[in-house]
Image: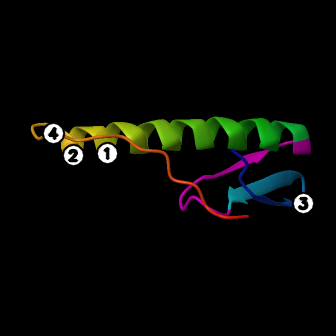
Amino acid sequence: MNYTAVIQQRDQWWIGWIAEVPGVNSQGRTRAELIENLQSALEEALEMNRADALAAAQGSPYEKINVSLAA
């Protein structure tokens, strides 16, 4: 799955956000470090969201399905 990173250099830092996932942002001294940090932050946020969703469904029958958006 692909996400959109909005990045920019501000003074000596690179900063960025993942457009599709609120709260996923990071910084780095280099562009490459920023991208690595954003990937890490995105993975952590998605895993936390998955865990929260599964915890909310516990106690009652549920199913997991894949949902896709048209390009």
Residue 42 horizontal side relative to residue 17, left or right: left
* Tag 3: amino acid: Asp
Q: State the SS at label 1.
A: helix
Q: Which residues are magenta?
A: 19-31
**Residue 30 visible in the displayed image:** no
Cα distance in 3D space between marks 1 and 4:
13 Å
Residue 62 horizontal side relative to residue 7, left or right: left
- Residue picked out by circle 2: 56
In the current view of this chain or complex, which residue is farthest to the left? 59
Q: State the SS at label 2.
A: helix
Give me the disc on residue 61: 4
Residue 60, percent from left and from top: 11, 41
Residue 8, percent from left and from top: 86, 62
- Residue picked out by circle 1: 53
Query: Marks 2 and 1: CB-CB under 8 Å?
Result: yes
- Residue picked out by circle 3: 11
Residue 6: quadrant of the picture: bottom right
Residue 22: quadrant of the picture: bottom right
